Amino acid sequence: MEIIITHHTQTPIYLQIKNQLKEMILKGEITDGFVLPSERTMAKMLSVHRNTIIKAYTELKSEGFLASSQGKGYMISYQDDSEKEETRSNVIAWSSLIKDEYLDLKITFDDLFTKSYSSNNISFAGGIASTEEYGKEDLNLILNDIIASDNLEAYSYTPYQGIYNLRLNIAHFMQAKGIKAKPKEIQIVSETNQALDYLAALLIKPGDVVITEEPVSPDVYRTFALAGGRIITVPIDEEGIICDRLEPLILKHNPKFIYVNPDFQNPTGILMSLKRRKALLSLSNKYKLPIIEEDGASEIRFEGVRIPTLRALDKGNNVIYIYSFALTFAPGIRMAFVLADKTLIKSLSCIVSIRLISLDSISQKLLSSYIEKGIYLKNLRNICADYMEKRDLMCTCLTEAKTLGLDFQKPTGGVYLWCKLPPDIDFRRLYIKTSEKGVSFIPGNVFYLKGTKGDSYIRLNFSYPSKQQIEKGIKILTEAIRESIKK
C-alpha cells in the first residue's frame, strides 16, 4: 500500500490520503477485512499530523468504506451487509496485536533496500559486496576440501562462541591491525546487525541513553530504540564525530555507551581523524564510558595513511569492536565478530546460546581457512583495486550532475558517495523519475533519527553495481536531476 502526498497542489493532504485509499478499495487492491494502520502509525508513515489521518479515515467511514471498533482499529468495509458480519468474526486484526514500534519498521529504508535488488534494476541503494569480488576459485577449492573430508565435524553443531580455529585465525589477523586479541575475547556472529541486537539486549535497559553519531545507519538507531534505549545524536563533520559536543551530553545524560563507525562511515564515507579518535578515547577513559566501534570498511582504503582503529588505540579495554566481512568476503556468506572484554564476551555467548541452536559450521570453516591460507589478505588487494576503479568511474560520470548543483567529497575508501542535491530540486519528482527508469538510491533523511535533516542528500553505493550499470545509471540519475530542478 503506497500513498504519495504532493505538497505542490491545492488539494488538502487529508483528501489526497482519502482519495488514494478510496481508489485502492474500489480497484480491489485492498479488500474487505483489511485493517489499516493505526492513526498514529499511518501519520508516522506519511510524516503528517495524526489529525490529518483522523480526518481522512472519518471521511471514508462516513462514505461507508471503513468500519471501526475498539481494539481492532479501522477495517475496510465495502462488501454486502450479509457478508460483513462473517468477515468481522473470522478476521484477526494483526496490526492491533503487533507493537506499534514494529509496525513502523516497514517505513522507507527496508522497502527501498529490498526493491533495489529486483531484476532489471540498477541499484545504488545497497551496501554489499560485488558478486565478482570474493575469489570464487579459491573458495571452491576450500569448500571441496571441507566436503571431501571424512571429518564429520564440519556438519555438526559448533560452540556458541564460534569455532576455536576461526577465532584463533581472527586473533592473528587482528595483530596485523595493531589489535591484541585472544580467542576467548572473540564472539562469532552472522552479521553486524545481529551483533548490535545482542549487545543492545545485553547492555540497554528501558530508558537508558545511547549516544550515536549522525547521520547514521537506520539499522543502528532502530536496534537501540527497540531495546528501550533513548537515542541522542551528535553531528559529524569532515573529521568524524564532533567531540566538543560530547562532554556536556555525557555529564547530563550519563549514557550507557557511544556508538561510532569511524572508518569510511555509513552513509558519508568520512574517515574519522586520529585527533578525534584520541579525543573520543580520552572521554571514554575519563567517564568510564564504553564505545561500540563498528568496522566494516577499514580494509577498503584507496589513498592516504591507515589510521589505527579505536580498539587498537584503546589502552583501557573500553572499546567493543565489531568487524564485518560483508564487504570483503562472499556476500551470501554472512560472517562478523565481536571483540571485547572476556567478561562481556562470556555474557554475549550466553545470549547466542539462548537465541540460536548453533552457528553455521561450514561458513565458519570456510572463512577460517580463507584467512589462514592468506587468501583473505591477497583478495583484499583485488577488491580495493576494483572498488577504486568503480569509485573513480562514478565520480567521473557525475561531472555533469555537478554542473547542475550536485556536490560531494570524493571518499578515500569505503563504498559510498554522500551527495548533496541542488538546493532547488523537487526530490519527489527526482525519486519518481529514477524509479520509473529502474535506478534506485537511498534518500538521506533515513539516516537521521528525526528523518528531516537529510532531505537534501542521497547515498550512492558503488561496490555492488557493475561498471556498465554505473555508467548507465548515473546518466539516468543526472537527467532526472536536470528534469527535477524547479524552474
Image (cartoon, grey):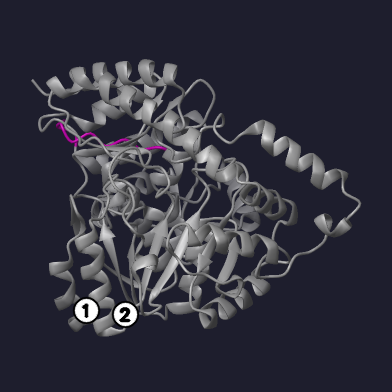
Which residue occupies 26% across, 26% down?
A: 430
> Circle 1 sits on which residue?
250
The answer to whether residue 41 is visible is yes
Q: Residue furthest left?
A: 487
Label pair 1/2, CB-CB below 8 angstroms: yes
Q: Secondary structure at mark 2?
A: loop
Residue at (59% x, 49% y) in the render: 334
Residue indicated by mark 2? 289
Q: Secondary structure at mark 1?
A: helix
How crowded is the residue under tag 1: few (<14 C-alpha within 10 Å), some, or many (20+)? many
Whether the magenta-drawn stretch holds residue 156 is answered as: no
Q: Quadrant of the N terminus?
A: top left
Above or below 422: residue 67: below
- What segment carries the magenta color? 1-11
Q: CA distance from mark 1 to mark 2?
A: 9 Å
- Is 295 on the left or on the right of 135, as rendered? left
The residue type indicated by label 1 comes to: Ile
- The one of 104 and 9 positioned closer to us in this rendering: 104
Q: Position of residue 65 (x, y in %)?
A: 43, 43
Does residue 25 appear anywhere in the picture? no
Query: In the visual, does 306 lie left or right of 340?
Result: left
Check disc 2 and give the amino acid type.
Answer: Leu
**Which residue is outermost to the right?**
150
Quadrant housing the C terminus: top left
